[in-house]
Image: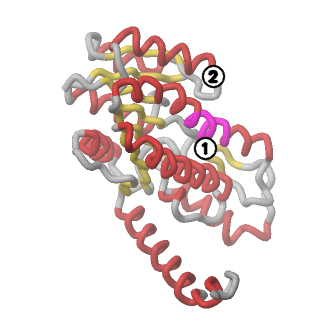
Amino acid sequence: MNKVWFITGCSTGFGRYLAKEALEQGYKVVVTARKPADVQDIVAAYPDTSIALALDVTDAAQIKTAVAAAIEKFGQIDVLVNNAGIGYFGAIEESEEAEVRRMFEINVFGLAKMTQEVLPHMRARKSGHILNISSIGGLRSFPGVGFYNATKYAVDGFSEALSKEVAPLGIKVTIIAPSGFRTDWAGRSAKDSATVIADYATTAGKNKGDIRGYSGNQPGDPVRAAKAMVMITETAHPPLRLLLGAAALKGARAKVEELKHDIETWADTSEGADFPKA
């Protein structure tokens, strides 16, 4: 029970619930947020086993400083949770480049830089577990969140490759793929595009309205999700991808069927693209 967790984005959402759960179960936790004051209530309840650090994952210098402070305080990092992330609503055509780039900086490049900074410490100890918070939207796409989907597909691809690189080094990687949970993701944590095109009202517009409309009433329980995430770090053989929520499971199964249909329907065409066999 001496594992040290390092969690990004703990001011709200999964990061906050997960920090509390890990601390309650007796782990040491590095609780990070852009404004440490936002997580002082968490560390105040566990002064001996937690530390609050300022961290903006788009700031490489701050990442380096936070990781060094965590090592100095606890001596190691056993579980890295790349949770910090934002959402963005808008049809592809409606979306603004500056907002999309900002989302990629946080959701993809920030996650990658955090991973690169922690990996040397895990490699030195030949152990560790990295949890990358993705989404069912990293496996299956939806209208109105296409660029958000793109960031999560990037996280999934990055994580799968990483898992193959670090497995021989004793390091595990798990992609966390939730569906709708009662966090703030569909509330103030996600921006809307300023441009609205009427032709997308029944696709992107409708889905955006549906997601916004059920914010606070999603079926997913973040407390149960946090318990599931802690549990997989305690197993000898954790999954590469952990789906959280019935909707995530349903969506993943539908994606598998769609893939199977296209693969098998067009198998002859796929094989026919090769040079003829001698």
- Residue 274 drawn in magenta: no
Q: To which residue does mark 1 refer?
A: 190
The kind of residue tagged 1 is Ala
The kind of residue tagged 2 is Ala
Seen at 80% across and 60% down, the residue is: 93
Q: Position of residue 30 (x, y in %)?
A: 39, 21
What is the magenta range? 104-112
In the image, taking residue 148 as reference, residue 32 lies left or right, namely left
Seen at 61% across and 41% down, the residue is: 108
Seen at 54% across and 56% down, the residue is: 138
| Prevalent SS, magenta region | helix
Q: Mark 1 falls on what kind of element?
A: strand
Check whether the beta carbons of the residues at disc 2 and disc 1 lie within 8 A of each other: no
Q: Give the quadrant of residue 44.
A: top left
The mark found on residue 60 in the picture is: 2
Q: Which quarter of the rendering shows the C terminus?
A: bottom right
